[in-house]
Image (tube, grey):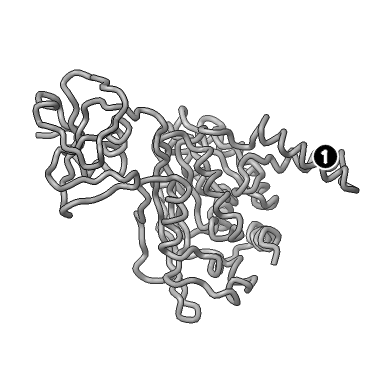
Amino acid sequence: MNVETLVSERYAEGAKAVQEALCCPVDYDTSLLKMLPTEIIERDYGCGDPSRYVREGDVVLDLGSGGGKICYMAAQIVGEQGAVIGVDMTDDMLELARSYQDEMASKLGSDRVDFRKGYIQDLALDVSALEQWLAQNPVKDLAGMQALEQWKQRQRADSPLVEDDSVSLVVSNCVLNLVAQNDRAQMLREVFRVLKPGGRVAISDIVCDEPVPQHLQDDAQLWSGCISGAFQEKEFVQAFLDAGFVGVAYDKWESEPWQVVEGIEFRSVTLVATKPSRQDLYDGGDAVLYRGPFSKVEDDLGNVYCRGDRTAVSRRTFELLTSGDYQEHFVGMSPAEEINNGCFCKPAGTLRPAAETKGASHAGGNDSGGCC
């Protein structure tokens, strides 16, 4: 079974006529739908709403952008200073998305959405450029194949479809499960590559509670219908951890399964994660206090936090834990005056004396970002 051809053919049909079996019910932000053409809304196939994680000023990458629904929703949030990139491999879907680009740019006040043809497991390869090269240099023999591979290597290095460290948020809506099993590790490495340090992911997809047997994976309709290619629920989390992400969590989890096939439950989830910074691994005299309710927790970097203790952390970890999804769990404490004590070499769980952070404001204390 050629997964890419199968999926492309099924979604090409979905671009021309509504395919209800390709999606499950989703409660989208209706205020963002008002601006969208009806055709784009009707020909969208997903299982969640990752647009809810977009922030003003973000550079958003939508994997498997289809008819452009999530892209055009995100474009309303990012504003004039942000941008949205949609990557898809299906010509009919790209044509649908692009057909409304001028209209949407007029409504938005600027053209801040860019649709690109590519494979989400190879975000460096510009497939449109590849097609142009092949039209001028048809591969007829081994020498032609070698020339093709050399061209692809140069193109990926010199003008990648999506550049390294260039986007702040990667979203996807029921697409990762369509990628062939042996391409998934590379796909997540690519997501990690294109994200800026500190960048986030918000992936809505289908997971299953038990591994899918091979005979169901071989069913073309079940695979292209976002069922038998589903990640097992633990496997999905682990795949992002293996790619180097931290703060991996299920932010949304549907209690009722979308489908049950041979006793296996398939449900919609939204997974969030963060690409850690490669910098700021110095001792700035910072500490964090874990609020509870558990006696202690361990993060994905191996740091341990006991409830109520002022735990010493590097500046990188401090910034990570006092922003985004972590900040409701931690209170951050810094010295009254900024310092740099060099490399942070303390063992995990080392406590910071209160005297070292006395007199400074505390981060993450309440909704206003301070503490009372």
Residue 75 x, y percent position in the rendering? 48, 38
Residue 230 x, y percent position in the rendering? 51, 65
Of the residues shown, which amino acid type is indicated by label 1? Ala
Image position of 156 (left or right of 53):
right
Q: Is residue 346 above or below residue 261?
A: above
Work out which quarter of the rendered image holds the C terminus and state it. Answer: top left
| Residue under numbered circle 1 | 147
Q: Is residue 162 above or below residue 14?
A: above
Work out which quarter of the rendered image holds the N terminus and state it. Answer: bottom right
The picture quadrant where one finds residue 257 is: bottom left
Is label 1 in a helix, a strand or a loop? helix
Image position of 240 (left or right of 153):
left
**At 14% across and 47% down in the image, what residue appears?**
307
**At 40% across and 53% down in the image, what residue appears?**
271
Q: Residues within 10 Å of mark 1 (few under 14, many from 20)?
A: some
| Closer-to-camera residue (295/99) | 295
The picture quadrant where one finds residue 220 is: bottom right
Image position of 226 (left or right of 16):
left
| Closer-to-camera residue (104/164) | 164
| Closer-to-camera residue (305/115) | 305
